[in-house]
Image (cartoon, rainbow, N blue to C red):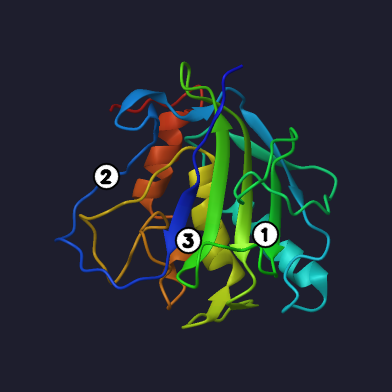
């Protein structure tokens, strides 16, 4: 299968948004054209690096935050489910320069100079997909463990809450794009371009769920474009 790598990046920058509205954004296989970027499965597995972040001890605390991040995307209108697989110590992820596909959807914190995206990038999701069909075959998530301290339940400059970033990157993993405008900046959606320092982006909003359910509707649910 002809596959393309499309890293999706969450940056911590200052933005000004338009007046509140409703909506969500999805990815297409050829930029602004092509097929919807999505999994052809209703059950997607993932594997966590056993060490997780070096900043959080014990590692199980960090790992449980990542598991909880997947759980936040569970909603009645979507038929998509996530299943945890065996741990993986690989850090050569599809989201990183030089990383290659291995058939496993891996999540890891990059703690050394192999992180090349800079300070303002907190996480990167790198899906492999077919440009012809938009079907995703693998998507790894890398977190910036080099230039940021990671915590549980605390956010701020250079101190990042695991779920506040992981929930967003999982949104990219399933095919959602950034919500660029049209929402209340005091209550941003998970797929906003920035990680909210008040940790509000760790909880998907109705529009985030609407995007998920558009891509992966439950049998009893339908969405309109």
- Residue drawn where x is 83% and y is 76% of the image: 58
Query: Where is residue 50 drawn, in percent x and y?
Result: 83, 60
Element assignment for label 3: loop
- Residue drawn where x is 50% and y is 29% of the image: 38
- How far is mark 2 from mark 1, CA to CA? 26 Å
Task: Please count the marks in the image.
Answer: 3
Residue 123 visible here: yes
Residue at numbered disc 2: 23
Using residue 104 as the reference point, say whether residue 171 is left or right of it.
Answer: left
- How far is mark 3 from mark 2, CA to CA? 16 Å
Q: Quadrant of residue 103?
A: top right
Q: Quadrant of residue 190?
A: bottom left
- Residue drawn where x is 54% and y is 28% of the image: 129
Q: Nearer the viewer, mark 3 or mark 1?
A: 1
The answer to the question of whether label 3 and label 2 lie on touching residues, with beta carbons closer than 8 A, is no
Q: Earlier in the sequence, mark 2 or mark 1?
A: 2
Using residue 187 as the reference point, say whether residue 19 is left or right of it.
Answer: left
Q: Quadrant of residue 111?
A: bottom right
Residue at numbered disc 1: 66
Q: Is residue 115 above or below residue 9?
A: below
Query: Where is residue 138 drawn, in percent x and y?
Result: 64, 34
Q: Residue furthest left?
A: 19
Element assignment for label 2: loop
Circle 3 packing at 10 Å, graded few (<14), some (14-19), many (20+), is some
Residue 74 visible here: no
Q: Is residue 161 above or below residue 180?
A: below
Q: Earlier in the sequence, mark 3 or mark 2?
A: 2
Query: Where is residue 99 drawn, in percent x and y?
Result: 67, 45
Residue at numbered disc 3: 203
- How far is mark 3 from mark 1, CA to CA? 13 Å
- Residue drawn where x is 19% and y is 52% of the image: 21
């Amino acid at each position: 299968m002809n596959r393309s790598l499309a890293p999706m990046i969450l940056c911590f920058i200052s933005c000004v948004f338009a007046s509140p509205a409703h909506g969500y954004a999805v990815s297409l296989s050829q930029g602004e054209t092509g097929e919807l970027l999505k999994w052809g499965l209703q059950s997607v597995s993932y594997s966590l690096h056993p060490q997780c972040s070096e900043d959080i001890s014990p590692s199980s605390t960090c790992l449980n935050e990542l598991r909880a991040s997947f759980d936040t995307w569970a909603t009645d209108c979507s038929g998509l489910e996530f299943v945890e697989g065996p741990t993986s110590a690989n850090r050569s992820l599809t989201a990183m320069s030089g990383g290659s596909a291995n058939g496993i959807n891996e999540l890891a914190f990059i703690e050394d100079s192999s992180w090349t995206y800079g300070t303002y990038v907190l996480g990167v999701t790198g899906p492999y997909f077919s440009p012809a069909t938009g079907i995703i075959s693998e998507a790894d998530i890398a977190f910036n463990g080099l230039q940021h301290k990671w915590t549980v339940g605390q956010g701020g400059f250079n101190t990042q809450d695991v779920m506040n970033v992981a929930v967003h990157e999982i949104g990219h993993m399933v095919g959602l794009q950034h919500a660029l405008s049209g929402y209340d900046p005091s209550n941003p959606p998970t797929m906003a371009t920035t990680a909210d320092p008040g940790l509000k982006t760790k909880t998907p909003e109705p529009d985030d769920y609407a995007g998920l359910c558009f891509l992966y509707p439950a049998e009893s649910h339908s969405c309109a474009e």
